[in-house]
Amino acid sequence: MAEIDSGLEQMYQEVILEASKHPHGKQTFAADLADEHATAGQASVTALHEACTTGQSHQFNPTCGDEATVYVEISAQEPHIIERLIWDGHGCSISQASLSVMVDLVEGQPVDHAMELFADFHELMQSRGRGLDDESKEEALGDAVVFQGVSKYPMRIKCALLGWEGLKDSMARALTASGSPAQDEA
């Protein structure tokens, strides 16, 4: 995708704001670490799928205070499928929208596909606003391409990546718990 024009960038900003206002996959289950009486590790979620292994990861961006706890249930049999993906947290519209879009992209998908999207999103975030040269990667990222403009601002890249890092870590924890080899970074 070429450098985005101002009209397209404005539309992308609107998509990000809408996704942050109505986030997909967000549930309240983690301790609010902004509360001085809360302690990490208080989060508990009940697995919905008996034949799944679970993983959870808490991510924190000290630069701006964004934080998210990502919880995943992965099918035990191969290919490992993300059966459930939920998150809890707070932060800026970029981090919240990125988590929401990520849920839409990877829930119900094989772990290998989620790792490909993880790598493609990282590549997009390193593009400095230029986007990706591979149209098939952009197409696979779907609504996540709206974060192309974010990649121009190094301080905001961490906001967009927060949930994706939590996804990768929680999947690795679930796969490790199941005895399957954790996915290598793509």
Image (cartoon, rainbow, N blue to C red):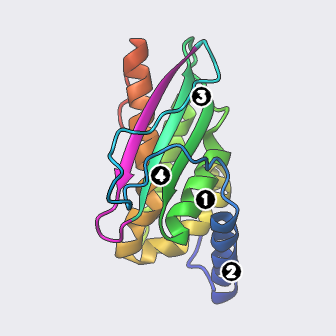
Q: Position of residue 121 (x, y in %)?
A: 50, 54
Question: Which label sits on residue 110?
Answer: 3
Circle 2 Cα neighbour tier, 10 Å, few/some/many (<14 / 14–19 / ≥20): few
**Residue under circle 2?**
8
Dots 3, 2 in contact, CB < 8 A = no
Q: Which residues are magenta?
A: 52-65
Q: CA distance from mark 4 to mark 1?
A: 12 Å
**Sequence-first tag of 3 and 2:** 2
Number of numbered discs visible in the structure rendering: 4
Q: Residue at x 58, y 24 (%)?
A: 47
Q: Residues within 10 Å of mark 3 (few under 14, many from 20)?
A: some
Query: In this rendering, does residue 33 appear at all?
Result: yes
Q: Disc 3 versus disc 2: distance between alpha carbons?
A: 31 Å
Q: Amino acid at mark 3?
A: Pro
- The kind of residue tagged 1 is Ala
Amino acid type at image mark 2: Leu
| 5 vs 69, nearest the viewer | 69
The part of the image, by quadrant, that contains residue 147 is bottom right
Q: Which residue is mark 4?
A: 163
Q: Earlier in the sequence, mark 2 or mark 1?
A: 2
Relative image position of residue 8 (x, y in whole percent): 68, 80
Residue under the point 48% across and 43% down: 70
Helix, strand or loop for disc 3: loop
Disc nearest the viewer among 4 and 3: 4
Res 109 quadrant in image: top right
Q: Which residue is mark 1?
A: 144
Query: Which mark is in front, 4 or 1?
Result: 4
